[in-house]
Amino acid sequence: MDDIQINIAIDAMGGDNSPTKVIKGCEIFLNFNKKIKLIIFGNKNLISNNFLEKYSQMISFVHCEETIADNDVPSSVLRSKKNSSMRKAIEYIKSKKNIGFVSAGNTGAVTALSTILLGTLKNIKRPAFCSMIPTSKGFCIMLDLGANKESNENQLLQFSIMGHAFAKTKNISNPKVAILNIGTEEGKGKEYLQEAYNLINNSFLSNDFIGYIEPDQITMGKADVIVTDGFTGNIALKTAEGLSNFIMNNFKKVFTKNLLNNIAYLILRKDLVRFSNTVNPIKYNGAIVLGLNSVVVKSHGSASPEAFAQALDNCSEFVKKDINKLIIEELKLVNFVND
């Protein structure tokens, strides 16, 4: 798809310090991606004319009077704010090819609007937030990271199939799939987890299914794909991100403590930078909402401009690789029951 025009629709008004942060993120992205076009939705009165003029050949702008706030209730958003930047951007990508959508806005609103307006793939009941988590062997794919507070066994099967397909786009030929649980024994955990275990183990994924994985094993690289409900997944993700920030902040304190430590830093600098890049949350910002008929990427609301640029980069990659095509092919290999 290298010769095909890739487009990204952007909600400029979502997230902390927007639209300033979003626009700076767009600038960073455009400086390294000259062939991708951005369609930016937001309040034009709050956007720098210098930005609009400088990148006029690479962007188009759609003025929107309304903004969806972080405290807006998703059910209310579905009925109101029809001219919001988020809604207009999602409506724009519907039924279009080679395009994706990125927002750092209200998570519930992104999930609700994209599900209702774009629809889900056949046999997918609910979409799932999916992202990469750093491990000792590189990374693993984890979902759901917050789209659904609760999930049943059939939905976990659907998540496992989508995650399995996603991992293949990352050049993992036989992705190992696991269910996040409080223990690795077959009888551990809630009933729906045990039922999900049986469903996955009796599907075409059986040869790649390794059973349960505990939270302390997530970063060990035992599994390529880890499935869970969105409540548990979101807690696990934010715990990992908080721990990463804690480690990096304390590294800085240690190596700036005195002259001897400064010298130690200079000696270890290359290895420390490499490690820092591995666990830096910026590198992994931008979760794809798997299971929708279009590519939707959710950036952290508190993401920096650099992190938002990473979300844009992820979106362009997902569009180029046509991830839904592979998911649809794998979904055909399972006979689903109504849930």
Image: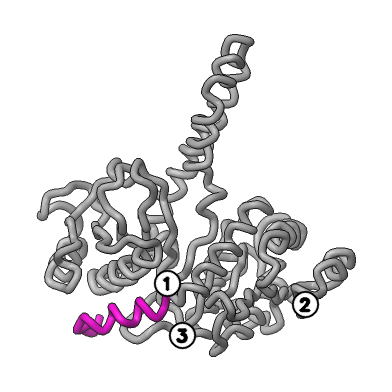
Place of residue 209 in the rendered image (x, y in percent of width and height, measured from the top left): 18, 61
Task: Determine whether 204 is above or below 95 in the image.
Answer: above
Name the one closer to the observer, 289 or 204: 204
Please, what secondary structure does the residue beneath circle 2 have? strand
Q: Residue at x 59, y 83 (%)?
A: 93
Q: What span is in magenta?
A: 323-339
Place of residue 230 in the rendered image (x, y in percent of width and height, measured from the top left): 39, 61
> In whole angstroms, how far apart are the C-alphas of marks 3 and 2?
25 Å
Q: Is residue 324 magenta?
A: yes
Name the one closer to the observer, 198 or 321: 321
Query: Mark 1 and mark 2 in contact (Cβ < 8 Å)?
Result: no
Q: Is residue 198 magenta?
A: no
Q: Looking at numbered disc 2 in the image, what kind of residue is underneath it?
A: Phe
Task: Determine whether 35 is above or below 186 in the image.
Answer: below
Q: Earlier in the sequence, mark 2 or mark 1?
A: 2
Total numbered circles? 3
Q: Earlier in the sequence, mark 1 or mark 3?
A: 3
Residue named by callout 1: 290
